Structures are given as C-alpha cells and as structure tokens.
Amino acid sequence: MAKATIQLEGLACPSCLQKIEGATKAVNGVDKESVKVLFNSSKVKLDFDDSVVSIGEIEAAITKVGYEVTKSQVRA
Amino acid sequence: MQRFILRKKNQIAAISAVLIVAGFVSALALGQEQIGMWALVVASLLGIAPIAIQAYQALRVKVVSIDVLVTIAVSGAIIIRNFEESAIVTFLFLFGGYLEQRTLNKTRSAIKELTEMAPESALRQTEEGQFEEVDIEDVDVGDTLLVRTGAKVPVDGTVLVGEGHINEASITGEAIPVSKEVGSKVFAGTILDNGTLQIVADRVGEDTTFGRIIELVEEAQDSKSEAERFIDRFSKYYTPAVLVLSALVWLISRNIELAITILVLGCPGALVIGVPVSNVAGIGNGARHGVLLKGSEVIHDFSRVDTIVFDKTGTLTIGNPKVADTRFYNEDQKSISSYIASVESESDHPLAQAIVEYFSDVSTLPVSDTDVIKGGGIVATVEEKRIVVGNAALMEAQKIALEGEIAADIAHFEKAGNSLVIAAVDGVAVALFGIRDQIRAGVKDDLQRLKRLGVKSLVVLSGDNQGTVDLVASELGLSEAHGNMLPEDKAAFIKELQSQGHIVAFVGDGVNDSPSLALSEVGIAMGGGTDVAIETSDVVLMNSDFSRLPHALGLTKATAFNMKQNIFIAVGVVLFLLLSLFLSDWMNMTIGMLVHEGSILVVILNGMRLLRYRLRKLT
C-alpha cells in the first residue's frame, strides 16, 4: 500500500470536500477508508494499491471534478 | 475545455458584471430593450457555464452539491425568461466564490507562514566529496550535508565536523543561540547564526521535529469535533432534501419562481464553512503564539475546563534545585565541604548536583567505596573517613543520631519548605542543607489570570514532601496541594476528580506523567519541542513557556464562542430567508442569493477576527 499526499490549489467551498471524496473513492485501487480531505490545508491524503492504479490516474480523477493538483508525494 | 472554463471563473465573473451593467444601462437609460435583454442572456450563459460543469462533475460522483441547485435554479429562470435574475444570480455566485477564496486564504495565512519556514533544499555531499544542492525531498537518512552561516538546517541530524551557534527559536522559542559542536544534535528549520557545520541526516522530511509539528498543525485544522461531524452528516442529506422540497413546491403550486427561489435559499453554505473557519483561525493564532492546539475537540474541551492540576518539579518550578540554606555542626567547615563535594559529585541526583554547584569552588578529593542507596543518598570513603550524605531515612539506617540542635534545624527547614540533605562524617552529623527548587518567574501572575478566565480550582501534585508542596501552594495561591505522590497516585487523583464531574487539564512533565496526561481531558506537557511532549499532549506549549497557558485558555474560549456565533448566524440567516420567502413579497432569487453569499462572507470574516485575538491585560 502506497501513501499519497496530494496538494491542491486552495479549496473554498464546503461541497468541494464531498466531490473530491466521491471522486477519489470511486477510483479502483484506492483504499476508501483511508481517504482524508484536508479542507484547510487543501490536501488529500489516501492509501492506494500501486499495482492496481497509479498516482497519475488518481490525480486525473481529482482534476476531472475540477480541482487543480499542484503536486503530489508518494511513499511506498 | 472544461478545465479551461473552470480556471477562468474569475474572468467570467468580471465579464458578467460588465455585461449586466451594460444591459441595465442600455435598457433603462438608452431605451434599447432588446440589446439590454441580449446582454443579460449572454451574461447568464457565460456565468452558468462553470457552475454547470461543476454541477455535472459533482453528479458524476453522486454528490448533490450547491452547484447542482444553482444550475437548476438559473436554468429555471432562463426558461421563464427572467434574464435579470439568471444573470445576477450567476454573477453573485461566482463573485461570492472569489471573495470566499480570498478571505479563506487570509484566514489560513498564519499556518501557511509556518509551512513556509520549512527548508526546501540542502547541500549534499557527492561521491567526490563536493557539495551539491538538492531538493529537500531527495535527502535520505545517512546523507552528509553542509550547512553554511545564515542557512536553515535542512534536517534533524548530528554534527560531524565544525562548530557554530544555532538559533532554535522556531522549535523552542528560545532566541538565545545554542552552541553546537561535533556530536551535538541539530534540528530542521533552525538557523545557523555563525559557523559552518557538516551534519549527518538522522531524520528527514516529515519525520523531523519541525515536520511533525507542521503535520500536527495541519491535521489539527481539519480535525472535527462532535458538532462538526454532525453538521457534515446534516448537510449531506440537507442539500438533496432542498431539491426535493423545491420539486414538491413546484408540483403543488405550479409556481416556478417560488420553487427555484427555494433552491437558492436552502443551501447550507454558511453552516458548513462556519465552524471550520473558526477552527482554522483559532489554531492559526495559537501557532503564531507558540501554542499548538491539537484540534477542534481539544479546543472544545479546554474551553470548558474547571480544574487544572499541576506537577510541581519542572512545571511550576524551574526543575533546577539550589541550596537555599546550610548549617554546619563542626568547626572544620573547609574539610567537611571538601568531603561532601567530592562524594556528591559521584551522584547524578538533582539534589546532589545542587550541592556540587553550591561547592563549585571547593577542591575535591579522591573518593572510594562509593555506595549509592536509592531513595536515600550516598555513602563513600574520603581520606579514610566514612562519609554519608542523604536524607533523614538514610541517617536512621546508618544509625547516625540526629538530636538536639540538628533535629530542631531539620524541623525548621522542613517547615520552610526545603528538601533536606544531611551529611555525616564517621557516624556524626556535621552539616545540613536546605535545598529549594525555585518557582518559575511570573507563574503567580499566570495562575491568577487562569483563575480570572474561569478556572475554579488549581491543584499541585508532587513526589516531594508535603512541606515543600504546601509552601508552593501558599505562595502561588493554589486551592489544593498534595505531596508524596507517585505517578500512579497522581493518575488516581485525576480519576477521582473526573468521577465528581470535573473537567480536568493536567500540566506536567511529558516523560514521567504520561498516565495523568492521557487520563485528563486536556493534557499539557511542558517539554517544549521534545518528541514525548508533542506526542502525548493535547495542547503543546512549544517553548515550555508557562506564560502561554493563560493565552491558550483564553484563545480556546474565544474560539469556542466564535464557532457558536457562526452557527447561530448561519442557521438564523437560512430561517430568515425561508420565512420571508413564504411570508412576504419582496424575497426573490436575486436577493436570496445576495443574502446567502453575504452570510458566508460574514461567517468567514467573523472567524478571521480570531486571528487577532490577544489576551487583554487583566489587572
């Protein structure tokens, strides 16, 4: 299980949280229970199986719901 | 394409504004109704584009968000050809979002400052022995790094080569530079005032003390208390419910205008954002003042604390005992001092060290046959004489008589609140030392401030004797004092208080008092930036500064109150909007959106007030 910390551009609306949560949880290979969206620091922390999905795909899912990813860090 | 539109939200809002103004001017002032109408139509379509995209994306992940509601409402307005409303509502929504972003960023700025202090690059030694600049993330444990004068130490490490002075203010708050030499430990985020160091990396990135403080602060910002979790669950069901309500109203009354207005008014924006904003501002203020509040729940508990229990040594006192009074019962003071100093320097007990310090300019003699007795003292031989230094219990065990003058002095010293050390040479008591641990400066005033902030009782618990504890209690104005307590006694005491319904905060040493820290509702460790303190406490005083305690308490109370204010404003506004919709004539979509966005801004701005919170000077 790899740990990802994804930095986003500032989140302003409360419903953003739910959208990002929904989007990341829907990605195959992401550990649903581990998804934590930090509203105030605009970060997403989650665990994922790097043999099933890549960090790029997770980032893409987030960008698709309309949020820019500034950078991400993965720790195996 | 979608991302392009979303990124240009602010520009779209600006263009919308221009179009709307142009539309009204040409319709009202120039009489060009058609052009006016088309301007508004274009503004509406431009404005709805990003909102509709967001709504679509939300629905794809099965979230009914506010964008969905607004999109439906505006579409409805366009269908009934009310272009004024559609244009203005989209503009207000976009503009409101822009303002929210800006004010939220300001609120989060305090914590951003902290993260920006983190080092970004380091000078790493290559195989050839040169130093090259690398990204901080590429540094591994075991790398050799160079730190030049004026630079930030990039990682937690140990000095290999060189020496210098480091300003550790970012971790401990102490502005006095600490000197470092080979073997000293250095911390990430601190600044090398002068000198040059080569260090080996022990901990990097998130594992450094600095990294962990930042991580704690970030997690604290988003930690949710019971109230917040409830609000979150509430809003998940609330938004779809508004949709349903609006649909019902439309079916029953066939009044589209009414139905879509409900959509706009019902959104719980201010409520969901209100509490987290106070949280962030409160924690940000704390971080700026050297206090780390580990989350919303901690803020909530600490604000309701009615009893604070203090450990004595190292918390209320400096933890550095000093000889306060001495008595000699033999004329040869010089030799006796010498024997005592020599023997005591064999022990690392704080009381022994106090005596060694007292006799710092006395020459020491060789010591042999040293026997350290735990809980008693030390026995050794100097110049063929048997020296015993320790407490009264040790004297009794060694069959050394303490009578007459000596006994009277002992009683006197104890009453005065001293810890006692008795010295005997060849079975006869020759000297008595009264040792006191000084109370930290300013503690008395700080405790008074705590009382004035509403704490009902202040208690001190200590392993020291009752006399010392009583003296401290009377000097500081504490409500209760208990001595001779082992760590488990302290924990039991706290349990008892809690069973009586008190909310207890415990202030103590991170290492020895973990059970008490864990038990109490709010644990506060005075260990400064040490790992143990950070791990175990709920409120971390980043530089062991006792004077931060009143500020911390005042801040949490202000934050808790602020959250309540925000909830009140948010709920009040929604109720007001809904009532005036049904009971009066003048409420429409535009005004509804205006009030809605306004309430969100009010709530954020109210939260921002906390950033400037300062404890008033209480006389």
Image (cartoon, coloured by chain):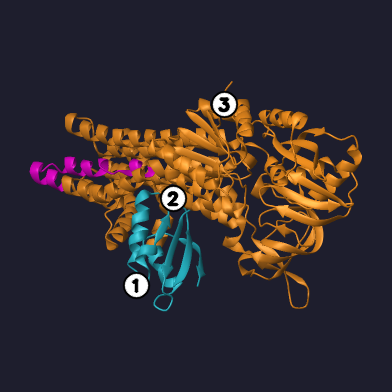
Q: In this picture, is B129 found above or below B93?
A: below
At a point 68% along the width and 39% down the height, the residue shown is B318
Please identify the quadrant where the C terminus of chain B is shown: top right
Whether tag 1 and tag 2 are in contact, CB under 8 A, the answer is no
Specify whether B584 is left or right of B228.
left
**CA distance separating discs 2 and 3:** 33 Å
Specify whether B486 is left or right of B400.
left
Please identify the quadrant where the N terminus of chain B is shown: bottom left
Residue indicated by mark 1? A28
Q: Amino acid at mark 2?
A: Asp
At a point 70% along the width and 43% down the height, the residue shown is B396
Q: Callout 3: helix, strand or loop?
A: helix
- Between A8 and B565, the residue placed more toward the observer is B565
Quadrant in which residue B571 is drawn: top left
Quadrant in which residue A51 is drawn: bottom left
Whether tag 2 and tag 3 are in contact, CB under 8 A, the answer is no
Residue segment shown in magenta: B247-273
**Residue B248 lies in the magenta-colored region:** yes
Chain coloured orange in this rendering? B
Give x and y (percent) for residue B555.
Answer: 50, 35
**Residue B240 lies in the magenta-colored region:** no
Q: Name the mark nearer the viewer: 2 or 3.
A: 3
Give x and y (percent) for residue B137.
Answer: 60, 66
Task: Using the image, name the chain to which the residue with label 1 belongs.
Answer: A
